[in-house]
Image (cartoon, rainbow, N blue to C red):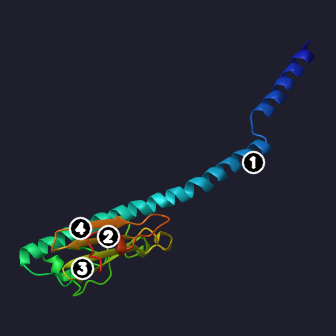
Amino acid sequence: MATNFITAKAMNFHLKQNVDGFSLVELLVAVAIVGILGAVALPQYFNQVHKTRQNEAATALSQIQTTIAAFVDEMGLLPASWNDLNKISPLMPPEGPANQDHFFWISLASTSCQKSAAEQCYQVQAIESEKIFTLTARSKHPDAASYNIVACLDLSTGASDLRKGTHANPVSTKDLHCVRKES
């Protein structure tokens, strides 16, 4: 009788060992599923990150449009540089105040844009022609080139527009409504 008890106990021990783990095939299937999900999810995640940065830059461009209009209302003349706009509302790129005497490319301040992480930044420039300011913003990140932004402000009519590029299609200044078409 003692032999039967030991044998039954030994059998339970062996059965327990077989139940407590995953087989190699089960582990390989689980790893394959996780890999497939990662391959699908990661590109979508990075697209969302680019869209978030683009939205943040679009907000900054909208603020610059407002600052240009406020400068014209306050000073009675057109701004000629980032330094002029600083008189109304400070523009703070990661490098410090935007006090340049031109409207060439400057970096926009954002949560992820820092001197040490320049590729996380958006750059903006402004061009004025016949009282129409055209703003262009682009990402410094090589994978986000199509996530550009263009905006315009027509100081004669008060019209403004802002367009954002998508993953598949960058946007052009030709898409803006306040840019006068040449006849």
> Mark 1 and mark 3 in contact (Cβ < 8 Å)?
no
Q: Which residue is drawn at 12% across and 71% down?
A: 70
Query: Gap between marks 3 and 2, in whole Å?
Result: 26 Å
Residue farthest to the front, as pictured: 183
Please, is residue 109 above or below residue 22 in the view?
Answer: below
Label at residue 160: 4
Instruction: Give percent across and percent down for residue 25.
Output: 79, 44
**Residue of label 2:** 176
Label at residue 98: 3
Viewer-closest of 29 and 78: 78
**Residue of label 1:** 28
Question: Which mark is in front, 3 or 2?
Answer: 2
Can you see residue 89? no
Which amino acid type is shown beneath numbered disc 4?
Answer: Ser
Which amino acid type is shown beneath numbered disc 3?
Answer: Ala
Q: How many labels does the image show?
A: 4
Image side of residue 121 versus residue 155, left or right: right
Q: Mark 2 or mark 3, which is nearer the start of the sequence?
A: 3
Label at residue 41: none
Q: How crowded is mark 1: few (under 14 residues within 10 Å), some or many (20 or more)?
A: few
**Quadrant in the rendering for residue 157:** bottom left
